[in-house]
Image (cartoon, rainbow, N blue to C red):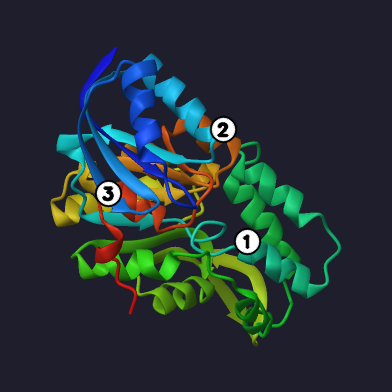
Amino acid sequence: MINKDQVVTLVHSNSLAIEGLSKYFQNTLSVTINKVIKLSECAYDLYLESITLEQSQELKKKCYLEKIDICIQPINAREKKILLSDMDATIIENETLDDLVKLSGVETNVDETSKLAMEGKIDIKTTLDTRLNYLKGKPKSLIDQALARIKFHPGSEVLVKTLNQKGFITSLVTGGFAPISTFVGDRLGFQNVISNEFEFKDDCFTGEYVPITAGKNSKLNYLNKLTDEKNISKSQVVAIGDGANDLGMLVNSGLGVGYHAHQIVKDSVDNQISFNDLTTLLYYLGISKNEFDLN
C-alpha cells in the first residue's frame, strides 16, 4: 500500500542530525523528500512524495532505536481544531484515584489494578467501583492531600496555552474525578473538563459517584458529541492518551497519539510519543518552537 503526500515529523531530545536521516530516507528507504522544514533544533518536518507501509515500519524501527519520536500523517489532513487530552499519566504524572486510595491508608495493590485496567484487561468501570468503595467513609480532606502531590508532565502548560492561543477547542477528558480534574483543567487553561464526579455526605466519601466518563466508550461519546455540536469533522481532532479507556477517542480522531503509552495503545495507534515531552504534540501539528506560548 502506497500513501501519497505524507508529512513525517521527527523529534529528538537533543539536536537532530537531519542530513544523515535525509540520506537514510533517500538512499536506504528509496523515499523522495520534496521539502524539509525546521521546527526547532530537535524537530523537523519532512514532506514526502509517497511512502509505503513497509517503508514506514522500517523508519519507525530506526527511529525507536535512536530514541526519535515520529509521526506520519497525510499533508492535506493535518489541520486540526480540537484537542482532546487524557489527564492521569498523560497531562499529569499521577494516577490520582490511586493516590487517594493510598492516602486513605487502605492496604491493597491499587497500582496493579490500575495497570490492568489501562491495559484493557479489566473493565474500567469495575476498577473505578472497586477503588471508590475503598474510599467509602474516608474524609473529603484527602483530596487536598492528593492535589498537593500532583506533578504536571513537562510541556503540559505550553501545549494547552499554545493551542488555546491558536484558537483550538481544548478539552480535558478523563476517567478521573472532579474536583481534582477541575483543578488540573483550571491550572492549565483547558476550556472544557469532562470527568466523573465524587459524591460526599458529611464531608466524607460515600463510595458512590456520578459516572460521566466511566464507560468503555465514554471518551468516544464525548468526541462525537463535541464534533456534532461544533459542526467540526472528527478528522480535525487531535487526541492524546495512554490507556485502554482512551482508545475510542484516539482511533476515531484525525490524529490519535499515544503518550508513553500502555502496550494496548501502542498496538492500536499508529503515532506515539515515547521519548519526549508533551510539546512534541505541537511539532506533530506543524507548530514550530518560535510559535510556542511560553509566557
Classify residue 193 by image quadrant: bottom left
Report the front residue among 261 and 112: 261
Give above or below for 146 relative to 212.
Answer: below
Report the front residue among 247 and 270: 270
Classify residue 81 by image quadrant: bottom left
Q: Amino acid at mark 1?
A: Glu
Where residue 177 appears, as percent x and y from the top left, is: 53, 67
Of tags 3 and 1, which is closer to the observer? 3
Please indicate, yes or no, whether residue 163 appears anywhere in the rendered image.
no
Identify the residue position indicated by label 1 in the image.
95
Query: At 26% across and 65% down in the image, what residue appears?
Result: 290
Where residue 122 appears, as percent x and y from the top left, is: 65, 40
Q: Residues within 10 Å of mark 3 (few under 14, many from 20)?
A: some
Report the front residue among 151 and 212: 151
Q: CA distance from mark 3 to mark 1?
A: 36 Å
Which circle marks residue 38 in the picture?
3
Q: Amino acid at mark 3?
A: Lys
Q: CA distance from mark 3 to mark 2?
A: 22 Å
Q: Amino acid at mark 2?
A: Leu
